[in-house]
Image: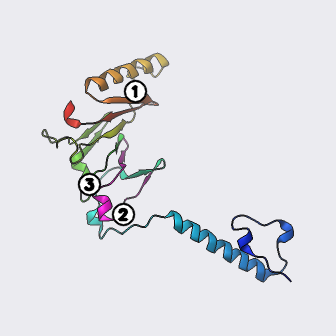
Amino acid sequence: MAHYKPSRYPIGMPPLNEIPDDKEAIDVSILESRRHFNRLENLTKPPTLKVQSTAELPKLSKGRMGVWRNGRICDLTGLSNKTLENLSDFIIDHEYGTVLWKEPVNVKRANMDEIVRFAKEQVDVYPDQPDRPAHGTGFNKRMQITIKNVWPKKGRDEARLSKKRRKLEEFTVDRGYKFIDYKNGEYTFEVDDLRSN
């Protein structure tokens, strides 16, 4: 009796007329398919060095932080110290809003509670520091900020939402920032330099 060769069909099922009758051949084909899948899976995983301890990770008491990848927040654990020192797409997500840095930042041992403060309809970066770092240093780099649950005070009809959008656009431009969007109660804008306002 001929044995089924799994390499002919590395992914998916072979035609029904080519599936062998004996159990041993089927077990081998399943094992080979798993090996093939594992090889493919390992090719897509980038090698990373583990962080020596959680003391190297940034600290945040409320909300979550990570790296923005493919529309979701990925955890920072497992990233190397070198990666933490030059981290792209760092994001903090809180019930009141999000901050996504568009340029690499050094998050190693950073106390994010001191750097970013969230409140209702408000996000402050370096809230207690009148002398913020120079543009391009620390966390004063290009970032996208979204403030959640920003609604007109009297109703949510189309006219009031349009008026709220216009006011937010004017406010954003007056501050020297770039208006991105206002949709579903989320106000999004981009900041190039915190010291510009």
Report the residue at 44% width, 21% height from top: 161
Q: Earlier in the sequence, mark 2 or mark 1?
A: 2
Range drawn in magenta: 73-96
Q: Position of residue 188 (x, y in %)?
A: 38, 33
Quarter of the rendering occupied by the N terminus: bottom right
Q: Which mark is residue 106?
A: 3
Q: Is residue 148 magenta?
A: no
Q: Earlier in the sequence, mark 3 or mark 2?
A: 2
Q: Earlier in the sequence, mark 3 or mark 1?
A: 3
Image position of 178 (left or right of 74):
left
Residue type beneath disc 3: Asn
Quarter of the view holding residue 30: bottom right
Residues packed near mark 2 inside 10 Å, few (<14), some (14 to 19) or many (20 plus) = some
Disc 2 to disc 1: CB gap under 8 Å: no
Q: Position of residue 75 (x, y in %)?
A: 40, 58
Report the residue at 26% width, 23% height from top: 174
Total count of labels? 3
Location of mark 2 (residue):
79
Disc 3 to disc 2: CB gap under 8 Å: no
Image position of 134 (left or right of 72):
left
Q: Position of residue 6 (x, y in %)?
A: 73, 73
Residue type beneath disc 1: Trp
Closer to us: 72 or 161 = 72
Relative to 27, say whether 94 is above or below. above
Relative to 101, say whether 173 is above or below. above
